[in-house]
Image (tube, rainbow, N blue to C red):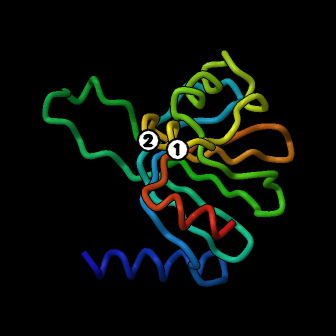
Amino acid sequence: MDDVREQFIKEREERYGGSISFISFAKYIGSSLGNKPENLSGLIYIIGQNIYFEDFQPSPSILLTNRDQTPYRKFEIAINLDDILEAVNVKELECKKSINGLTPSSEITGIKTWFEKLFFKSVVMIRLKDKSSIFLDITNNKVFLTKI
């Protein structure tokens, strides 16, 4: 497993011309652009001035027949750190409302009180200068937020 990890890191550092300063498992939940929720599992990493997310090809389900499976399409995003207005922990419920078009992401505020931290699942909202937002469930979100 370490060989696979080292190979992945080496390939990405060569591709993007820098070293990885942060890497974590993450789930891309979706964006505020009205796209349906994605819930794609993958890796988020930072190289230089860019954040990258890429998903993994899901394992085939034993319960699905071949005709029920849709072809896999790789999903990748790159965000320049200069394009970010803010990155904060928000309630997962609020992010899902934004993804489904019920609440503008500009109205979502970060989790602030101990009550919210204790009783609500949080995800990371990255608000961009173009007024859109991206929502991610990052395993190591505290370290991620200090890196950007």
Using the rendered view, name the quadrant where residue 45 is placed: bottom right
**Mark 2 crowdedness (10 Å alpha carbons): few <14, some 14-19, many ≥20:** few
Using the rendered view, name the quadrant where residue 109 is placed: top right
Instruction: Locate residue 57 relative to residue 125 in the image: left or right.
Output: left
* Mark-to-mark CA distance, 2 and 1: 6 Å
Q: Which mark is residue 114?
A: 1
Q: Give residue 120's position: percent from left, percent from top.
A: 46, 35
* Residue sitting at x 24%, y 75%: 1
**Quarter of the rendering occupied by the C terminus:** bottom right
- Kind of residue indicated by mark 1: Trp
Q: Which mark is residue 118?
A: 2
Q: Give residue 134's position: percent from left, percent from top.
A: 65, 42
* Residue sitting at x 43%, y 54%: 42
Marks 2 and 1 in Cβ contact (< 8 Å):
yes
Q: Which element type, helix, strand or loop, lies under badge 2?
A: helix
Q: Which mark is residue 143?
A: none
- Kind of residue indicated by mark 2: Leu
Q: Give residue 5's position: percent from left, percent from top.
A: 36, 76
Q: Which element type, helix, strand or loop, lies under badge 1?
A: helix
* Residue sitting at x 61%, y 70%: 46
Residue nearer the viewer, 98 or 77: 98
